[in-house]
Image (cartoon, grey):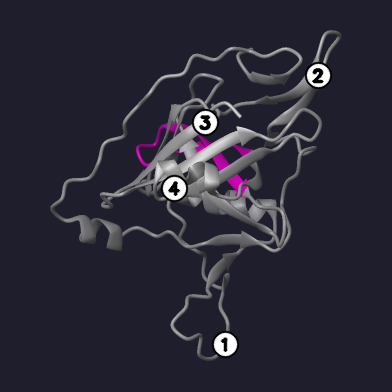
């Protein structure tokens, strides 16, 4: 199985660069206005490193131990439909004993190393149907542990074990799940979409998978040496 292992034994994974298509300049604002990107938050993490759906996860055998993962480590480029500017993500392994992703993001790639990284997990949510009716894998990126976790909803067509591309799904909060501070906020947004269970997040993910994607997240290259 071609899963990435980080430990006494390391599985070499071929890396490739890919560029996602960008939106045409005309109609950008109209495209973005139709897409939803609400902040999804749970006041406590819904998964942790011992959850069977979570990656990375520990492995032990006669010769080695450590963490194995399904995602390519390094720089990832996120391009959102209708937005000419990319956002950069850095995803790396936390260590050998406590398995977790370390995820940071920045508008400019050169700033990634300077950003604080969040303890995160890639969550496998099963299969569902995409906008064209074809089967897709449904995933979520769970970022942060305290205070609670934020979630990106992701999908991809079934493919290689090591994942190097995701469609980032829309995040349209179900009615009644939006929370916001009462009274004047000084112009700052306080609203977010509250999820309280795994089942809620999975239901939302299945609904979002049937809509046009919000953008594309693509692996670019391996992490720089520490």
For residue 27: magenta? no
Which numbered disc flags the more N-terminal residue, 3 or 4?
Answer: 3
Say which residue label 1 marks: 182
Neighbours of disc 3 within 10 Å: few (<14), some (14-19), many (20+):
some
The residues colored magenta run 123-142
Note whether 58 is above or below 183 in the view shown: above
Say which residue label 4 marks: 169
Q: Give the image location of residue 40, x and y in percent.
A: 56, 60
For residue 140: magenta? yes
Q: Residue 182: which quarter of the image?
A: bottom right
For image coordinates 31% across by 31% down, the residue present is 19
Depth check, front residue: 224 or 189: 224
Which numbered disc flags the more N-terminal residue, 2 or 1?
Answer: 2
For image coordinates 55% across by 29% down, the residue present is 73
Label count reads 4
How far apart are the alpha carbons under marks 3 and 2? 22 Å
Which is in the foreground here, disc 4 or disc 2? Answer: 2
Which numbered disc flags the more N-terminal residue, 1 or 4?
Answer: 4
Specify whether 215 is left or right of 89: left
Which is in the foreground here, disc 3 or disc 4? Answer: 3
Say which residue label 3 marks: 74
């Amino acid at each position: 199985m071609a899963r990435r292992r980080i430990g006494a034994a390391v599985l070499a994974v071929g890396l490739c660069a890919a560029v996602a298509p960008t939106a045409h300049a005309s109609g950008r604002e109209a495209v973005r206005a139709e897409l939803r990107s609400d902040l999804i938050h749970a006041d406590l993490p819904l998964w942790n490193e011992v959850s069977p759906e979570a990656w990375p996860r520990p492995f032990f055998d006669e010769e080695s131990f450590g963490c194995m993962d399904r995602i390519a480590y390094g720089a990832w480029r996120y391009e959102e439909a209708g937005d000419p500017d990319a956002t950069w993500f850095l995803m790396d392994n936390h260590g050998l004993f406590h398995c977790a992703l370390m995820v940071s993001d920045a508008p400019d790639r050169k700033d990634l190393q300077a950003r604080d990284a969040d303890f995160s997990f890639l969550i496998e949510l099963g299969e569902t149907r995409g906008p064209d009716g074809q089967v897709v894998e449904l995933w979520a990126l769970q970022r942060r542990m305290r205070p609670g976790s934020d979630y990106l909803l992701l999908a991809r067509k079934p493919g290689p074990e090591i994942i190097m591309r995701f469609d980032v799904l829309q995040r349209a909060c179900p009615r009644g799940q939006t929370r916001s501070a009462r009274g004047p906020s000084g112009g700052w947004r306080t609203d977010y979409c509250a999820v309280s269970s795994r089942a809620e997040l999975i239901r939302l993910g299945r609904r979002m998978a049937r809509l046009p994607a919000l953008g594309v997240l693509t692996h670019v290259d391996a992490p720089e040496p520490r």
